[in-house]
Amino acid sequence: MSWKNFKLLTFIALFGLMMVYLRTNSVILPSDAPFKKFERYTPGSYAAKLYDLKNLQAEKAKQFTADIPLKKRLETLSESEKEIIERIEKEIFPHWYDTKYDFYGTTETPGKGKIACGYFVTTVLRDIGVPIQRVKMAQAASERMIKSMVDENKIQRFRKVPIKKFVYAIEDMGEGLFVVGLDTHAGFILNDGLEVRFIHATARKGISKVINEKAVTSPSLINSKYRVVGKITGDEDFVKRWLRN
């Protein structure tokens, strides 16, 4: 075989190996979320939203650790918190709506497979860049999960409290995103300043999927005798951990 032919065959082999690598290398996130590389370039895809959010996280972290006055750092924290809420509400949650519920569901891809309430919470938190043990915390009591992320002064507990009084208490805690644990359930509460909403993977008969509903009329919230709520935004330490992740 001539040297010229040998070089040509070597080039073809290396090119083939490179193409196999690009086609099979599916991981784009440290969390091992099952997305293929090309999906992050697909406008509007879940993978693209997470990729954008990860870049935002890195950008804000760089600003926060820069040699700047304390006032500027606090402004970065405030801006980061607003960005987290807006991205989750408008870009992350919508992808999960209508994903089927199952008690043993563990899907990591919205719209595909099925998911349990605890896994819905921990998967979303992990995907947005929160340092959390997805499987361990999904299987743990919801109060334990909340306490692992949020300082005690950002946690409130309610026993046999009427739903309207509960919603008023959430409004008093201010706008933001909350994780809520119930007797046998878990989900997110979002207070946007206009309305308090409950976002969760429900097992409710006739629905059985991820939904976004009014908190004040949610049977899951109404029927639970115990509710523990942790406000993950509005917690300076939480936002710092998000930036440092």
Image (cartoon, rainbow, N blue to C red):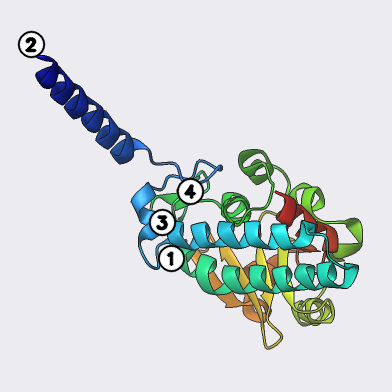
Distance (Cα) linking label 3 and label 1? 22 Å
Expressed as whole percent of the image width and height from the top left, the position of residue 52 reads 52, 62
The mark nearer the N terminus, 4 or 2, is 2
Could you tell me the amino acid type at mark 3?
A: Arg
To which residue does mark 1 refer?
Answer: 98
Q: Residue at x 71, y 85 (%)?
A: 193
To which residue does mark 4 refer?
Answer: 108
Marks 4, 2: nearer the viewer: 2
Bin the neighbour count of mark 1 within 10 Å (Cα to Cα): few under 14, some 14-19, many 20 and up.
Answer: some
Bin the neighbour count of mark 3 within 10 Å (Cα to Cα): few under 14, some 14-19, many 20 and up.
Answer: some
Q: Are marks 2 and 3 in contact (CB under 8 Å)?
A: no
Question: 159 or 231: which is nearer to us?
Answer: 231
Q: Residue furthest bottom?
A: 194
Q: Residue at x 74, y 49 (%)?
A: 145
Distance (Cα) linking label 4 and label 3? 15 Å
Q: Are marks 3 and 1 in contact (CB under 8 Å)?
A: no
To which residue does mark 2 refer?
Answer: 1
Could you tell me the amino acid type at mark 4?
A: Glu
Could you tell me the amino acid type at mark 2?
A: Met
Marks 2, 1: nearer the viewer: 2
Callout 4 secondary element: loop
Left or right: residue 178 versus residue 127 is: right
Expressed as whole percent of the image width and height from the top left, the position of residue 244 reads 74, 51
Q: Quadrant of residue 217?
A: bottom right
Q: Which mark is residue 40?
A: 3
Q: Quadrant of residue 136?
A: top right
Left or right: residue 25 versus residue 89 is: left
